[in-house]
Image: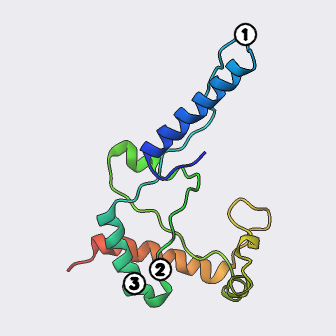
Amino acid sequence: MRAYSQQSRQRILAAIQRIVRAECQASGSSQDPDFQTLGSFPLTDNDPATTQRVATAFAAHFGDQAGELPRQTVSEDFSIIPDAVGIPYTYWSIGRTDREVYLTAEKQGRLQDLPSNHSPKFLPPLQPTLRTGTEALTAAALAWLARP
């Protein structure tokens, strides 16, 4: 299960446990259910000021090729490290599909058919992906390191 906030996450977990307990009781189970978390990732919650600073740097460098990602509930371990040391962060993404392939899929309403991370068919084009990623890292770093 995935959520957009810690409050929603706790509400969902409580609802799951309540429903499972009620199902066990309704079915006459002789034991109470046992709940165990097998895997969990923290919420990735971008810091607004950090995000704005990086977005401004990306807009200056990439122009209209920089855009905002819609909110997502992907499972991501990225935030574990900055959360552990209390550092504000922002999580960004770069294009992952050949532009023409993407535009064709978008026009046909078939974006869901494009292979994504962890798919055996996921193979972003080496260029411009590598160049774009390098430029994005550099632009983000310079947002803090460049002289005003």
Quadrant that contains the N terminus: top right
59 or 73: nearer the viewer: 73
29 or 107: nearer the viewer: 29
The answer to whether 105 appears left or right of 71 in the picture is right
Point out residue 55 in the picture as x, y percentages from the top left corner. 38, 75
Residue furthest front as drawn: 26
Q: Tag 1, which secondary structure?
A: loop
* Within-10-Å neighbours for mark 2: few <14, some 14–19, many 20+: few
Q: Residue at x 65, y 15 (%)?
A: 32
Q: Quadrant of residue 13?
A: top right
Three-letter code, disc 1: Ser
State the residue position of label 3.
Answer: 59
Residue furthest right as drawn: 120
Q: Nearer the viewer, mark 3 or mark 2?
A: 2
Residue furthest left as drawn: 148
Determine which of the numbered discs, if any, sits on residue 110 in the image: none
Q: Residue at x 33, y 75 (%)?
A: 142
Three-letter code, disc 3: Ala
Task: Please say if the residues under marks 3 and 1 sit with CB atoms less than 8 Å apart.
Answer: no
- Give the CA separation, mark 1 to mark 2: 55 Å
Q: Tag 3, which secondary structure?
A: helix
State the residue position of label 2.
Answer: 67
The answer to whether 27 appears left or right of 59 in the picture is right
Residue 44, placed above or below residue 134: above
Point out residue 27 in the picture as x, y percentages from the top left corner. 75, 20
Point out residue 40 in the picture as x, y percentages from the top left corner. 57, 40
State the residue position of label 1.
Answer: 30
